Amino acid sequence: MDQILSLAVDNLVSPIILSFALGLAAALARSDLSIPEAVAKGMSIYLLFAIGFKGGVSVSAHGIDASLALSLLAGILLSAGLPFIAFALLRVMTGLSRLDAAAVAAHYGSISIVTFVAATSVLDAAGITFEGYVVAVAAAMEAPAILSALWLVSKNGKRESDADFMQEILLNGSIVLLIGSFLIGWATGQEGFDRIASFIDAPFQGVLCLFLLDMGLVAGRGLRQGSGFLKRGLVAFGALMPLTGAVLGLGTGLMLGLSTGGVALFMALSASASYIAVPAAMRVALPEANPSIYLTLSLGITFPFNLTIGIPLYVAVASQITGG
Amino acid sequence: MDQILSLAVDNLVSPIILSFALGLAAALARSDLSIPEAVAKGMSIYLLFAIGFKGGVSVSAHGIDASLALSLLAGILLSAGLPFIAFALLRVMTGLSRLDAAAVAAHYGSISIVTFVAATSVLDAAGITFEGYVVAVAAAMEAPAILSALWLVSKNGKRESDADFMQEILLNGSIVLLIGSFLIGWATGQEGFDRIASFIDAPFQGVLCLFLLDMGLVAGRGLRQGSGFLKRGLVAFGALMPLTGAVLGLGTGLMLGLSTGGVALFMALSASASYIAVPAAMRVALPEANPSIYLTLSLGITFPFNLTIGIPLYVAVASQITGG
Amino acid sequence: MDQILSLAVDNLVSPIILSFALGLAAALARSDLSIPEAVAKGMSIYLLFAIGFKGGVSVSAHGIDASLALSLLAGILLSAGLPFIAFALLRVMTGLSRLDAAAVAAHYGSISIVTFVAATSVLDAAGITFEGYVVAVAAAMEAPAILSALWLVSKNGKRESDADFMQEILLNGSIVLLIGSFLIGWATGQEGFDRIASFIDAPFQGVLCLFLLDMGLVAGRGLRQGSGFLKRGLVAFGALMPLTGAVLGLGTGLMLGLSTGGVALFMALSASASYIAVPAAMRVALPEANPSIYLTLSLGITFPFNLTIGIPLYVAVASQITGG
Amino acid sequence: MKTHKAKRVSIIIEQVMQRRLAEAMHSADVTGYTVFPVLGGSGRSGEWSREGQVSRAGGMVQVVCVIRPERLDKLLEAAFELVERHIGIVTVSDVEVLRADRF
Amino acid sequence: MKTHKAKRVSIIIEQVMQRRLAEAMHSADVTGYTVFPVLGGSGRSGEWSREGQVSRAGGMVQVVCVIRPERLDKLLEAAFELVERHIGIVTVSDVEVLRADRF
Amino acid sequence: MKTHKAKRVSIIIEQVMQRRLAEAMHSADVTGYTVFPVLGGSGRSGEWSREGQVSRAGGMVQVVCVIRPERLDKLLEAAFELVERHIGIVTVSDVEVLRADRF
Ligand SMILES: Nc1ncnc2c1ncn2[C@@H]1O[C@H](COP(=O)(O)O)[C@@H](O)[C@H]1O
Ligand SMILES: Nc1ncnc2c1ncn2[C@@H]1O[C@H](COP(=O)(O)O)[C@@H](O)[C@H]1O
Ligand SMILES: Nc1ncnc2c1ncn2[C@@H]1O[C@H](COP(=O)(O)O)[C@@H](O)[C@H]1O
Ligand code: NA
Ligand code: NA
Ligand code: NA
């Protein structure tokens, strides 16, 4: 408990969290502070490339064991399964229509890569290692949830589910970049890492700060515009669902026999909700679902929840249980 | 005198100044070299974040004394007072209308954060320390001058001065980012700094070079288009006013009992003229004032003057007088 | 031979080449991965600034000998002469019209700065030094080829060749930035370098990776759209012409008495084909020439050829012959 | 296909005034509009371009509003008040729209 | 100068739908169009802006198509199918073009 | 509100030609215009998009010029000379403007 608290407090006064808080406060106060779209996208490409590359380098150093394939499979099952739980909870806890509930559910089965990155950075700071291939699991968890959600509303007449759409969600830029840089890191190993470490490693935390500043700005604007949709039931769901996801992630991580860090990351991935890939897919496939609901919930409630409370909690629980 | 000269020469052959000169020359020669707007804005966000953060870290290390509050107050008074001097000088030295004179005056009461950053970088190179909280003073000096200028022309019928407008100039992005990162640096201290030093410290000088390259390009284009407005009286004002401001900044810094570096920065702040926040405010509140006049003067004359001659002079004078 | 092979293999599994391959694969697979235009342009400005600056610093350290002027002259002659060879080859090997052939020829006389940068990075990794002023030669080689190509079709009625157009191609942004930063590096020397090394040196390889990722994306899209134009003769030209250029670059480098690295860079420059400055000039001066042909050839065939096979080959040959 | 008559109002205005224009339009009960970026231009106050401009604060935007003909005047009056003191170009043209219920 | 009558069709649509719209236009034999960026806007579903939007995936674009009057209906039908289920604004106006052979 | 008839000329042209078009317009005494960015498009020379294009040098822009009807021909002639050899689309439409003295 003490450990949890101290981790939580350490986490809260880190530059990363405070940068997010600054962005949130600025947007809520209607400051005109903003980060150009191109720069934000550039930073997210940097973060994906760096995190994927480092994961690959770690795999090249430690080799892979059987659990790589098992972990990927487990990730896919988690991503595909979580939307059903989310959907059931939403139908019970909130008054959302089937359509809106399915769209929200897709977000919670999928993952937020920034939450993942923030979790690795907390682990790094705490000196806890993790399996490098978890980054590949993160990529594998992006898309399956979308299919589950579409299945949930498939009775609703004709749905986009052609080959084109499948290709679009599977070859999504962030999946391709994550997997691609993972493979590059794997192929070039420590030597490749040394050549570009002062680019992908040294400034990483700082770029993450500015990126979270932007996330704060965007979340704050979303809350300002979408707060009307945040009925009490939805807010409760936004905090309960990540905890539910984390429990399932914990169980999965333990069953896979992962290290403390690996278990914590499985928890964080399951707990996190998408806010880029899934919203875009929902606009294509379920255009009648209200985007204000899923975006506000994912970015305005669950993301901050995970960043401030969730991650330190998951790390502490994983440490406790694995005895790490 | 020797010291001044050697500082000035050292300053002139630094990569920073030469990058500015390159941009200026390229624009005057009508090269199509340009830096994308989003990248330039990204660099300015980086510089603001880094300079604010470092200021906060320095305060967390040295603690604050009474002079923080006094310095902030002094900065606000300087910013509010300088426009009156500028206005009087302009009415005497140039043929500008009251309206144009007031708009120009607002720029000279406010500050240029790049001039400030360049000054800190000269101090760093010379091994002269300064009070970390001067960065908060810089933020505090951005807005008051705008109100003074509006007051100067307030007889001219109805003016924008509603709550909305006040909020807009006080929660201006650069003020929020500077103060926010200052507080983050203060809160996280040396530990926070160590985590992101290889992002906000190591590449700082280099980013400043590219940023000044862009400033040179923009100043050169402004001079090409706006040189028609630069009557002799205006050009003289563009060099005299910073010196006047610097003298007042010197007096204020000495009265506050600041260190050599602190005094030099007060001089640089008072001497500098805004070219982002104030022009935007003037377009809203005094749209009839001619933007070509204030922009060309601030960016085309005063900024290069401070960068090349002003800053080394202020540092030398501050060193001489404080015996630093 | 062994050395060539091992260099080639080392080269192929470097993060740089693999990043290019990732971009190429993503674009061919129709992934929506993309790097914002502003970020790509920002990276290219960074690379030009850094490579120019480092060239200048190297000249300031080793001084210049007579060969600087001779090298510049030789570069200009190569750039002006290669289009005639390219034009003749194209007329023989392909069915291109005079106009299209001239437009393609201009690209092969001019240079690709990224190919140059990639070559310097292979040299650095192999510990082979080179004359710093070769970067100035690169800048000098950008434009002459354009004039040769226009001369080749000058019978075709009136052509753009007014003073305006000359100024446009000579004061092209990349030429100005390369020469400008070269001069800044020269003027500020090692001291200047030390101040900004952690910006222009440390992250260089990493930025190059992301830049090549973008090049791969762009080349892949070009191949997808322009592959219809790639008749067998053109593809053969796209590989034969760089080899021809490299042989001439080799001869020139040897005649100039350059170091191993210098010779290899002369080869790479002669072998490379422009895809920014020349296409823009062609759109102005020869708008009837089909851009899909020259862009697909330069970016889709010759650039990847040089990156993967060409550069290691040129370095190996230069080493062998100069005994470096 | 069946189309309906409407008016397209285009207002080119300084970016710093965009929020105020939106508020003015809301007060005139105009809640549908689209904002387009502007790269540069030329007018009585000279030439400017986004990348080349002295202050990046000074850019312009184009606000386009498709509206039923009978509501045009109210919108023009709301816009005119702002455009009067500030730089700005207002043009109106006839268009046909697909779904009239949206406007 | 001699000009020819044509129709200008403007379709404001979500960016994620752009590729599908292009495909629909190609099936309707419309191969000439230009895509413009949109910074933000307001409508029945509220306000949004490119920099401020919660998901950057959610932006819109404007596709403008200049077409011979006799081909208008086919284009509108192709566009309507997509715009029906998705957010989107379609307007048509009369224009004159310089070279009729191009359209 | 009182409005006045004017013509809106839209010229979609390659970015590399923008400066030359501006010069041609100045020679035709047209000093008021606005430049809009273009994201991509499709035409006889195939599809292109700003992010996807092989050379970023190859983008296009739209130059829009609101002008008194009597000055239209002079402008079209100036524009046509450039558009003739280069890729480009010129359209003209009728608009009403608020302040006629500006044009
Ligand atoms: N006749 C016109 N047609 C199109 N845009 C115009 C025209 N006149 C002015 N503009 C735009 O409005 C801005 C300000 O115009 P002005 O107030 O005349 O300097 C210019 O920079 C252009 O972007
Ligand atoms: N009347 C209108 N005029 C111009 N643009 C509109 C109008 N109504 C809606 N839009 C655009 O279409 C988007 C979606 O509209 P809506 O579906 O009504 O929320 C808005 O964000 C605007 O960009
Ligand atoms: N019918 C059209 N409507 C709108 N834009 C067009 C049309 N035809 C061509 N364009 C634009 O002009 C560019 C060049 O056209 P083209 O010369 O036909 O390849 C295209 O990429 C489009 O941006
Ligand atoms: Na999840
Ligand atoms: Na000042
Ligand atoms: Na060449």
Image (cartoon, coloured by chain):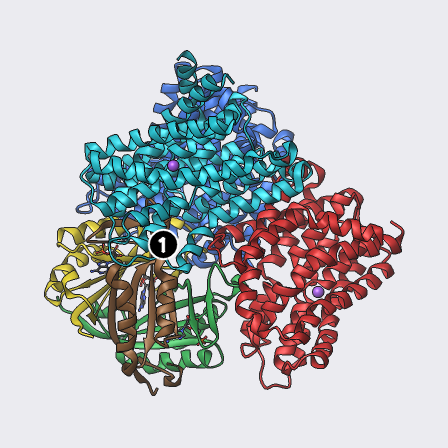
Chain colours: A red, B cyan, C blue, D brown, E green, F yellow
Please name the amino acid that badge 1 sits on: Gly
User: Residue D38 lies in what quarter of the image?
Assistant: bottom left
Chain letter, disc 1 residue:
F
Residue at the extreme left: F70
Q: Is residue A10 visible?
A: yes
- For residue E57, side relative to residue A112 (left or right): left
In the rendered view, tell whether residue C78 sits above or below residue A78: above
Measuring from the top left, give residue B78's x and y in whole percent: 41, 37
Number of labelled discs?
Answer: 1
Measuring from the top left, give residue B219's x and y in whole percent: 32, 38
Q: Residue at x 25, y 39 (%)?
A: B224
Q: Which residue is mark 1?
A: F59
Foreground residue, C49 or D47? D47
In the rendered view, tell whether residue B248 sits above or below residue B1: below
Q: Residues within 10 Å of mark 1 (few under 14, many from 20)?
A: many
Foreground residue, B163 or C160? B163
